[in-house]
Image: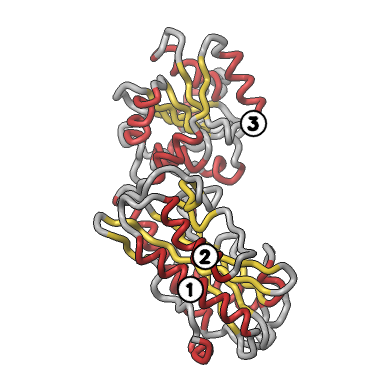
Amino acid sequence: MIPLDKRIREFMLKEHIDVILAQSPENFAYVSGFSSHQHTVSRQPGFACAIVHKDPVATVLIGMDFEVPSFASQGFEVLSFSTWVGNRSMDQIRQNNPEPAFVTMLDQIEDVISRREPKVVTIGIEMDYLPVQFYMQMKQRFPDADFVNVSPLFLQARIIKQPHEIDFMRQIIRVSDEALLATSLLAKEGVSEIELFDHYCRQVMASGLAFPSGWSSFTAGANSGKLGRSSDYRVQSTDVIKFDGGVHGDSRFYTTDFSRSWLMSQADPWLVSIKKNLMDAHQIMLDALRPGLSFQQLFHLGYDHTLKEFPFYKRGHLGHSISMGPQTAEVPFISHDQSGVLESGMILSLENPMYITGYNGFNIEDMVLITDDGFELLTPLTPHWLASESKYR
C-alpha cells in the first residue's frame, strides 16, 4: 500500500487540527501503508498508532516492540512500546544488557506530541473507534488539549480514491464479479442457499487476492425478504434468488459490495413486474451518472420511478460510497438529504432494492467509478437476467 498521510494533512490544515492520531486498523493502514498484524486481529487501539502533524514533518508510527521490525520506514519515524513478548536482540543477549525500561504506547504518544507541540494543541482522535477508557487516559495526559473527532475526516478523505486505490479496488471487484458469474451457473431450482454460498467462496479464495466478506449471502424465497445468512433452504420454482455481498482485500482492508436477483421458473407475475421496474430504475440512474450530478437528483431518478408504480415503496438510500470499512456503506449516500455532487474518482455501490417480508426480496446493485466524463461499470460480468429468465424480459 502507498501511504496517504499527506492527503490526511490536507484535511487537517482545512480543519485547523495540529495533530491527528490514526488508531483504527484501517486508518493506520491508510496513513502508513502498513497493516499492523495484532492491531488488525484485535481491533484494539493499544497495538499501533500513526501520528500525523500539521507541519510537513515525518509521520510517527508507534507499534509493538515485537512488530516494529516489520514496519516499512518509507521516511517515517518509527517508535516501539514494551509488550509481554520479551524480544531481545542478539547484541542484548551477548552483552547481557539489563532489560530496558517499560514504555507504554501512551508514553510514546505523550513524548511525540509534547516535543513537537509544547503549547496547547488540537488533537484529532477517532472517537467513533476509540473506547472511552483510552479517551479518558488521553485527557489525563493532555488536560489542556482540545480533542476533536476526526472519524468523519477520514471518511471524507477516503471518498475520492487515489489511482493506486482505484487499481486495487478494480482487481478485487473483478474477483467478486468473476466468482458470482461462475456461481450464477448453479442458480436454479433445487440448489440450496449454502451450496451457492460455498461455491462463491471457493471461487473467491481461488483468486489468491481476496476473501469473501463475512456478510455475503445467497438467500431465496422468504429468506430473500430479510437480512440473514445462507441456510440449507432449497430453492423453489416460485422463488427469487438474491445474492448480496462481496470480498475483502485481505490486510489492505478495501471491500466490495454488489447484488443480483434472479427469478425462478414459476415466479409470481407481480414479482416479475417488480424486477422489471427496479431494473429500469437502475438503468435510469446509470445513464445519468456524471460529475456534477447531485446525490439528491440521482436518488430521485431511481426512487421516483419505482414509487410511481409501487406507491408503498419506501427506501432511505439507493447507494453509497465504499472504501476500507469496517462498515460497507460509507458517506456520501445516494439519498434525498445527502448534500454534495458526484466527483471523478468516487467509487459507489448503486443499488435499487425492494424487500417484502415473509415473501421475497430483490436487490439490483452494481459498483461504479465516476470518471471525468461519466462512469465506468466495475461489475459488468455477472448478468442481471439469467438465460432461464428470458421469458420474463
Q: CA distance from mark 1 to mark 2?
A: 8 Å
Q: Secondary structure at mark 1?
A: helix
Q: Secondary structure at mark 2?
A: strand
- Mark 2: amino acid: Asn
Mark sitting on residue 368: none
Mark sitting on residue 279: 1
Residue depth check, mark 3 versus mark 2: number of the one nearer the observer = 2
Per the image, the residue denoted by label 3 is 131
> In the rendered image of this protein, does residue 30 appear above or below residue 243?
above
The picture places residue 154, in percent across and down from the top left corner, at 45, 37
Mark sitting on residue 352: 2
271 left or right of 306 in image: right
- Mark 1: amino acid: Met
377 left or right of 244 in image: left
187 left or right of 34 in image: right
Q: Looking at the image, do the residues carrying marks 1 and 2 touch, with CB atoms under 8 Å apart?
A: yes
> In the rendered image of this protein, does residue 70 appear above or below residue 249?
above
Q: Is residue 33 visible?
A: yes
Residue depth check, mark 1 versus mark 3: number of the one nearer the observer = 1
Residue at point 47%, 28% (across, down):
21
Residue 104 image-quadrant placement:
top right
